[in-house]
Amino acid sequence: ADDEDTFKILIATDIHLGYLEKDAIRGNDTFVTFDEIMKQAMQNEVDFVLLGGDLFHDNKPSRKTMHCCIEVMRKYCMGDRPIIFEILSDQAVNFSHSKFPWVNYLDTNLNISIPVFSVHGNHDDPTGTDGLCAIDLLSCAGLINHFGRSRSVEKLEISPVLLQKGNTRIALYGIGSVPDERLYRMFINNQVTMLRPREDEDGWFNLFVIHQNRSKHGATNYIPEQFLDDFLDLVVWGHEHECKIAPVRNEQQLFYVTQPGSSVITSLSPGEAVKKHIGLLRVKGKKMNLQKIPLQTIRQFFIQDVTLSEHPDLFRPEQPNVMLKVMAFCQEKVEEMLEEAERQRLGNPLTPEKPLIRLRVDYSGGFEVFNTMRFSQKFVDQVANPKDILHFIRHRESKDNIKECMDFEALLSRPTSEVLQLRVEDLVKEYFQTAEKVCILYMCVEDADQSLVNIPLSPLQTFHRIMRK
Amino acid sequence: ADDEDTFKILIATDIHLGYLEKDAIRGNDTFVTFDEIMKQAMQNEVDFVLLGGDLFHDNKPSRKTMHCCIEVMRKYCMGDRPIIFEILSDQAVNFSHSKFPWVNYLDTNLNISIPVFSVHGNHDDPTGTDGLCAIDLLSCAGLINHFGRSRSVEKLEISPVLLQKGNTRIALYGIGSVPDERLYRMFINNQVTMLRPREDEDGWFNLFVIHQNRSKHGATNYIPEQFLDDFLDLVVWGHEHECKIAPVRNEQQLFYVTQPGSSVITSLSPGEAVKKHIGLLRVKGKKMNLQKIPLQTIRQFFIQDVTLSEHPDLFRPEQPNVMLKVMAFCQEKVEEMLEEAERQRLGNPLTPEKPLIRLRVDYSGGFEVFNTMRFSQKFVDQVANPKDILHFIRHRESKDNIKECMDFEALLSRPTSEVLQLRVEDLVKEYFQTAEKVCILYMCVEDADQSLVNIPLSPLQTFHRIMRK
């Protein structure tokens, strides 16, 4: 029940305003969906909106993108609805980098009805000598509260924004995007500190927003969940585009993780085909509930994989005219997806007309590729991505890549499954135990690119490097 | 006296935010001066600020520039001081291009204490398919009122912003920067209409803001004052950087023209060496008074011309070591200017430390130029423009250029002095009288570049063109 003790928070991330803004078909998708998200915030009368980074797709958004963003925020975030939660922390600390270091809704010159809190993502991170990012313009104009920002590259000390509504108190932590290797190293070196309120330490709901790789892209190119403090209650994970918004319990750290996912499809991969949602988070005391809100304006995306060698009854590589047969087969698959898209779309007037379609064709086993441009011509008026419907893949190659990566990890004597169960303390302990061996590896790689470990190196390259030392 | 019937308006133009922002010495000049200007507005408790265009130097201002601009505007334009003038015109017409088509101080969500009205200049004019300009971002954020905008390239119909304070009523007209040739043609074709209030037509103080060439750069590459309607009371002329802020009466049209000039020195020419001011305009009924406010934060600029051939007692071209003598002479001149700068600067703590220095050396008569970079090395710590202190000129060449230009005008049988006394009606009449001859000339030139008359053509080129027809 929405009572005076219940915080209502709209959670969204990776809105990527301006993505493909020059595309004749998809150009307005991000603006339309941002409008939908903020309208949901207004209709649900949330206390605030919490964004997980990458509000903008480009570090330097175009004038049109900035204009659309400002328009939507002024439209939905300003108004007379009163705000009934307090800020207990020192705002000058929480927003120390801002020219107006206080939360926008307490500025007497601005009539804010929905405050928006956001960390920055890797797409809209601070750059240049002034260390400004795109959301700093919004912050300066009083439209957003940019938090979770640090100037140090060695050390993070996170002062939470402390919020109170009735008897519920939230400690809001955030880390704006940092290169994964750097943040990984800071965690390993015990240089990430989350400050906790002195008063009634256990009486707070601890909410943390992070914008990093969650899935493992390499040994240190992601942030393992077990790095995060176990006093947290809920982690909102930005950056990952697949919608996994239902909170998942980390059984080791005993917190929950919600991954809202992006609100626009930026790659035609299976993760982006998952139905997209934003979250309506309710927090009362230490209890929470997260309601999924499906987004209505998302462009449909259908993806299907076919393996040509699995259909020997239809075609074989040595047959004459095999290519025509394969083309007809692919065409049929695309048409099936288009029909399914049309059926689903009829139920929702907000869905854009043309879907995204991707057919991944595994042509290993002696088949040949054909001209995808010519193939796509047939669908030019029906799909939103006529230029890249078909994608030819060869299964064996990708297996090889994975194998090479695994071999490299074996060198570090730390298999994937093991790492996932380690905690920071264990990693540090192990670090010193295997210091000699690891040091050599670290040193030689650090030489090259200043990062702790550089994953794209093959085992052979690594050996060569070690030998040279 | 500042009473309830007196409008107080701060007038400034060509602030060029971001000009040379990457220069280590001059990088912050425009931001500092913009702060000074807005502070003056606050301290003088003006009713509003009126800007004449080119608030930004770059069409796409950098993040830093936008951030500085938003910061200054939020700092000075927001607050509790009440605004005591009304808007009588239809704001949806005045601000029809805006997503929030009303004046910012009437928006209940914004607590504006100083509204800023601005036209755009040629540096910050609308571009792209969306027709947005940099000040539209400020307008969308509620920080500025962008007026005087038109989408047509053929025709201008200007609806004034009608303002009333006590018994004083102002009709505020504006035209955002338009290419001079195009606007010239529109005037000639009678396509510029200034609408007048139906009620009590003569009871208004008619104030007009324009951002065009005022000085004649070519036959149609400027806007003659007599093109403007004679019902106007005061014209605020932007774009021209020389400060000629004291209103000058146009004896033919019976209006006054004030040219505030830029608030930053963007070229090291004599016009920019004139002391820079902004204006405090008071309007009561049909009477006005313009008080000059000298700007304190302007970087000093000293410019001096020397003609080497005028000093035969000091050096002659044929002497040995003449170059060393000339260098010593120039060095002395620069040192004189530096001393004078230092003397003047001591009186004003807001003046930037290093002055701009320009010595123009006419070396005609057989003298040779020397390495200006080496010369400048001596002053690298004392001047703000060490790279271009010296400028070598040869007087004869520039005379030739002027002559050629004049000859071309003679072809059009319309000498400069005559044009300046013509009014639009006369020009139209003359146009038809000399239609045959002029038509040929117009046609052939229009072919080339779509503009009515193309001045850079030499008389010879023009003759060739006519012969070809």
Image (cartoon, coloured by chain):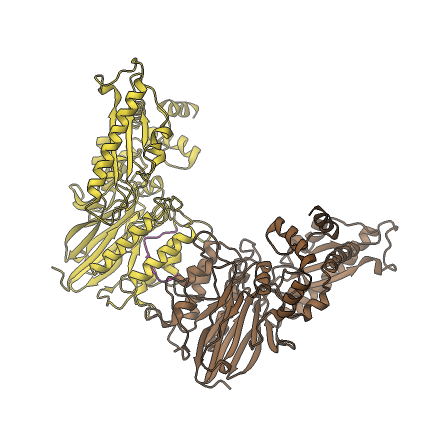
Chain colours: A yellow, B brown
Q: Nearer the viewer, residue A100 or A219?
A: A100
Q: Which of B335 and A30 is in front in this view?
A: A30
**Quadrant assignment, res B224:** bottom right
Q: Which residue is drawn at 21% across and 37% down?
A: A340
Instruction: Look at the picture and state if B105 lies above or below A164.
Output: below
User: What is the x, y in percent for residue A35?
Assistant: 29, 54
The residue at the far left in this view is: A1
Q: Which of A4 and B243 is in front in this view?
A: B243
Instruction: Look at the picture and state if A206 lies above or below A318.
Output: below
Q: Which residue is drawn at 72% across and 68% down?
A: B417
Q: In the rendered image, which quarter contains the N terminus of chain A?
A: bottom left
The residue at the far top in this view is: A318
Q: Give the range drawn in magenta.
A: A141-151
User: What is the x, y in percent for residue B241?
Assistant: 61, 64
**Quadrant assignment, res A7:** bottom left
Q: Does the magenta stretch include residue B402?
A: no
User: What is the x, y in percent for residue A183?
Assistant: 33, 43
Q: Which residue is drawn at 35% across and 52% down?
A: A149
Q: Is residue A146 magenta?
A: yes
Q: Can residue A133 be seen in this view?
A: no
User: What is the x, y in percent for residue B233?
Assistant: 56, 78
Q: Is residue A42 visible?
A: yes
Residue A270 falls left or right of residue B193: left
Q: In the rendered image, which quarter contains the C terminus of chain A?
A: top left
The number of numbered discs placed on residues in the rendered structure image is: 0
Chief secondary structure of the magenta span?
A: loop
Q: Nearer the viewer, residue B31 or B244?
A: B244
Residue A290 falls left or right of residue A270: left
